[in-house]
Image: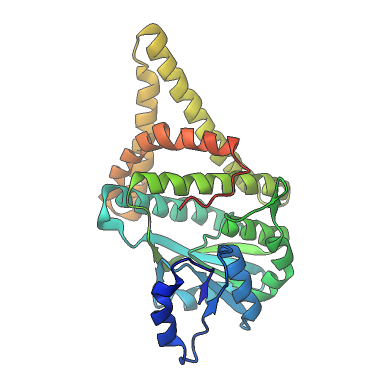
Amino acid sequence: VVDDGSANVGAVAAVHASYAYDPRFTIILLPSNVGKRKAQFAAIRRSFGDLVLNVDSDTEIDSDVVSKLVRKMQDPAVGAAMGQLKASNRNDSRLTRLIDMEYWLACNEERAAQTRFGAVMCCCGPCAMYRRSALLLLLEQYETQFFRGKPSDFGEDRHLTILMLKAGFRTEYVPNAIAATVVPDTLLPYLRQQLRWARSTYRDTLLGLHLLPGLDRYLTLDVIGQNLGPLLLAISSIAALAQLALTGTVPWWTGLTIVAMTLIRCSVAALRAGELRFIGFSLHTPINIFLLLPMKAYALCTLSNREWLS
C-alpha cells in the first residue's frame, strides 16, 4: 500500500498502524508529495510477483478480478489487461448515473472492440494488471516521460499502455473482471478530471501515432474517429450557432441529425446492455457539446499544463 506523500497522512496513521504487524501488507510512505507515478515506481521496485495489479485507493474490485485477469495474462504475449470499470457511487446524482453509463460505453464499445485486435489503447489506472518482466523493461522510459521539457505527472495509464504496445506486447480488456471506482458527483470536478484526461489523450495520441502502421487497420480508423468525431461535432455546432445568430433561422437539420445519432447510439447501448437506462445517456449530449468540446479545445491549447486539478 503506497501513500505518495499526501498532506493528510496523519489522518490515516491509525489505519497504517493497524496493518503494521500483518505480514500480508507493506505500507510505503513517501516523504513528500511526488504523485501517483512515483508511488508506482516505489511499489514495483519492491514487488516480487510475476504479475502486478494496480488498484487505486478509491476503487473496490470484485473477489474474482485477480483470477480472471490472471487467466488472460497466461498468454506470454499479453503485457497488460484491464477490467471493466463501474461507478461505485452511481446513485449519488444524475451526473454519476451518466458517468457510470459513460464508463460502460468506454469499456464495452471502445475497449471491447480494441481487444479483438490485441491493442487496448489505454488500460485504465483504477484496475489494470501488468507483466512484471515487461514493466521492468519499460520502467526507465515510463519514469522519464517528458513533454516540452517538463516531467509528465498524469496520464500514466495511457502512457504505460502505449509503451507496452511499442515493446510488442498485446493489451487486453476482460469485461467480467469488475472494478467499482468513485466518480465525480458534481460538474466542476468532472470537468477538471476530463480536462486532465484530454491533455493526456492528446499527448499520448501523438506518441502512439507511429505505432498504428504496425497494428490492425481498424485501430487506425478508431484513433482517427476518436479525434475527428469531436472536431466534426464542434464544427457542426459552431455552424449551427452562426446560422441562428446571423440569419435568425433555426438549424433544424443539424439539430435533428445530432438528436438522431444520439438516440441510435443510446438505443444500441440499451439493447446490448439489456438496460433501458442507457436511453437516458442522451442527456450527456448537451454536456458534451456545450462543456466538453470547449474544454477539449482548451486542453489542446494548454498541453504543457501539469496540474492534476483534483
Residue lying at 56% horizontally and 54% vertically, measured from the top left:
114
Residue lying at 42% horizontally and 50% vertically, measured from the top left:
105
Which residue is nearer to you in this view: 105 or 22?
Answer: 22
Which residue is nearer to you in this view: 214 or 241?
Answer: 241
Which residue is nearer to you in this view: 294 or 273?
Answer: 294
Residue lying at 35% horizontally and 18% vertically, measured from the top left:
252
Compared to residue 19, the image places residue 272 above or below, namely above
| Residue 184 appears in the rendering | yes
Q: Residue 243 appears at what percent x and percent y?
A: 42, 13
Q: Quadrant of residue 156?
A: bottom right
Q: Residue 24 appears at what percent x and percent y?
A: 49, 88
Residue lying at 40% horizontally and 22% vertically, measured from the top left:
254
Compared to residue 249, the image places residue 167 above or below, namely below
Which residue is nearer to you in this view: 276 or 178?
Answer: 178
Q: Residue 70 appears at what percent x and percent y?
A: 54, 76
Q: Is residue 251 left or right of residue 6?
A: left
Q: Quadrant of residue 168?
A: bottom right
Compared to residue 282, the image places residue 74 above or below, namely below
